[in-house]
Amino acid sequence: MTILATLGLLLISLLFGYWVNIKVFSPTRVAKWLEQLVYLILGLIGFSLGALDNLTEKLLVAGYQAVVFFVLVSAISLFGLYLSGMRFGGTHAEHLSQNPEGKQSHALMDAAKSIAWVVVGIIVGFFTKDWVSGIDEMVTFLLYFLLFLIGCQLRQGNYRLRKLFLNTQGVIIALVTIITTLFAGWLGSLVLGLSWHQGLAVVSGFGWYSLSGILITGLGDPVLGTTAFLLDLSREILALMLIPFLARLNSHMSVGYSGATAMDFTLPMLGKFHGAQIVPVCIASGFIMSILCPILIPLFIGIDPN
């Protein structure tokens, strides 16, 4: 019942932001508040981690788990996306001579800032864990507000569900990415000795590092949340680096491996190398994974294996 209530509130927050137009939440304010809120919650995640006993050991565990999941997700997803691109007509790159280094460096800078907030949070949590309380409750409250703002941003982007779900290439790429990623998560859970539902939860961010770690930590597992954060952060960085190469093979690989970020962070890079016709595909694929992320993670985390 607890997980159903949690999942229900998360979905209500997301859908309320998507369906209800409140004038004070203008696109400029939503974008600004969302960026600031993400950094704040990442800092609180670091605090929760820093307050744990045996911190060094748990950081090493999270890092090792992230590496295992990263290797499996990358290898299995790229292989599956290569096959789907060959079977369902993935397009090839159009603009191989252009190298949008500005967009790439900007995204990498965002990733560095995210890591910095987590690190600062860990340090503060390590030294003040005996003086500060109520962090978990604060993260939970902020999490609902974060989902509300994400819903607002999706509505303000004029994303129409019916149109997105009717984009055949986008739906195929999303389905292949989701299936191969979840399979890699299940396989990773066997390798690492985790419960199968924990493995599925960790990989269900689909590259959305600023949400996956927040969700899992907010639901009570900061170590697993750190694993998800490191996994999805690594995935986004690698996607930015590989898009010029993957675009030469087929669009399923470049768009699919970008995961949920295909509709925002990696979209400029994908557009540069594939041309304007890839944009609807990117938005459809990224949107489907973005919608599923806040649904699948709480669902998997809440499963009781007993």
Image (tube, rainbow, N blue to C red):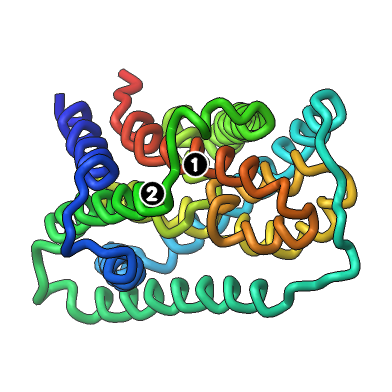
> At 90% from the left edge and 69% from the top edge, which residue is drawn?
97
Q: Locate residue 82 relative to residue 238 in the image: left or right.
A: right
Q: Looking at the image, which is closer to me, 204 or 263?
A: 263
> At 79% from the left edge and 53% from the top edge, which residue is drawn?
274
> At 41% from the left edge and 38% from the top edge, which residue is drawn?
291
Q: Can the viewer see residue 223 in this picture? A: no
Q: Residue furthest top?
A: 306
Asked if 191 appears above or below 241 in the picture, the reply is above
Secondary structure at badge 2 equals: helix
The C terminus: image quadrant = top left
> At 80% from the left edge and 25% from the top edge, which residue is drawn?
88
Q: Looking at the image, which is closer to me, 264 or 223?
A: 264
> x, y percentage for residue 92?
87, 46
Asked if 189 appears above or below 60 in the picture, the reply is above
Q: Looking at the image, which is closer to me, 281 or 108?
A: 281
Tell me the quarter of the picture where residue 281 sits: top right
Contact (Cβ within 8 Å) of mark 1 with mark 2: yes
Q: Locate residue 89 relative to residue 260 in the image: left or right.
A: right
Nearer the N terminus, badge 1 or badge 2?
A: 2
> x, y percentage for residue 37?
28, 67
Q: Local crowd at mark 1 within 10 Å, few (<14), some, or many (≥20)?
A: many
Q: Looking at the image, which is closer to me, 80 or 222?
A: 80
Q: Locate residue 187 relative to residue 217 in the image: left or right.
A: right
Amino acid at pointer 2 = Leu
Say the numbered circle drawn on residue 154. 2
Alpha carbon distance from label 1 to label 2? 9 Å
Q: Local crowd at mark 2 within 10 Å, few (<14), some, or many (≥20)?
A: some
> x, y percentage for residue 248?
89, 51
Q: Which residue does the numbered mark 1 point to in the structure image?
A: 287
Asked if 127 appears above or below 303 in the picture, the reply is below
Amino acid at pointer 1 = Phe
